[in-house]
Amino acid sequence: MTNTADERTDIVRELYDVIPFHRKHGIEIVVVTPRRAETKLPFDESLVGNPDLEVLHGGAIGSLVDLTGAAVFAGRCEEYTPTIDLRVNYLQPAGKQPLYATATVSREGSRSVWPISRSNPVTTCVQPGLASTK
């Protein structure tokens, strides 16, 4: 089991950097700690979901929220972990800038953890989720 944020971040980067979706979209693991993860999705025109408004597709945002929440657990378990439940509330559109997501553990059970993910620079979505820690 890893102890430092640098070790956890490196583990998750190794796991996530081989995933084709992450490579294709340049998703970056910024930091992973025992209770928090932060990721970055660079803006790309191919991710626009509404060309009239030039805002990101909700699926791209939801994917970033999901993988950020899972990164907390991947850092703990040093392996991929499944998302059991995911809900995204789209509060505001994400425009033509990099999108950052932060997942923070809000509570823990013996085999599950509930992260809350927020996407920045503005609060774009919130994910109350449940994930297995195996």
Image (cartoon, rainbow, N blue to C red):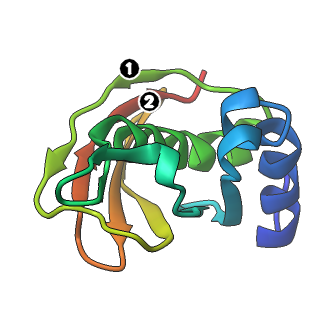
Q: Quadrant of residue 91?
A: bottom left
Neighbours of disc 2 within 10 Å: few (<14), some (14-19), many (20+): many
- The answer to whether residue 89 of the structure is visible from this angle is yes
Q: Is residue 14 left or right of residue 127?
A: right
Which residue is at 38% across, 20% downward? 84
Cα distance between the residues tagged 2 and 1: 5 Å
Q: Quadrant of residue 131?
A: top left
- The answer to whether residue 1 of the structure is visible from this angle is no
Q: Position of residue 117 (x, y in %)?
A: 35, 56
User: In the structure shown, which secondary structural element does the residue marked by tag 2 occupy?
Assistant: strand
Q: Which residue is mark 1?
A: 84
Examine the rendered structure and indicate whether residue 49 appears above or below residue 6.
above
Q: Is residue 96 left or right of residue 92?
A: right
Q: Position of residue 83 (x, y in %)?
A: 45, 25
User: In the structure shown, which secondary structural element does the residue marked by tag 1 occupy?
Assistant: strand
Depth check: give the residue in front, 94 or 128: 94
Which residue reaches farthest front? 52
Amino acid type, residue under disc 2 in the picture: Ala
The quarter of the picture where the C terminus appears is top right
Q: How many numbered badges does the structure rendering display? A: 2
Examine the rendered structure and indicate whether residue 101 appears above or below residue 73.
below
Which residue is at 61% across, 46% downward? 71
Q: Which residue is mark 2?
A: 131
Q: Position of residue 77 (x, y in %)?
A: 73, 36
Q: Is residue 129 left or right of residue 73?
A: left
Neighbours of disc 1 within 10 Å: few (<14), some (14-19), many (20+): few
Mark found first going from the N terminus, 2 or 1: 1
Residue 3, label in figure: none
Circle 2/circle 1 CB separation < 8 Å: yes
Amino acid type, residue under disc 1 in the picture: Ile
Which residue is at 45% across, 66% downward? 99
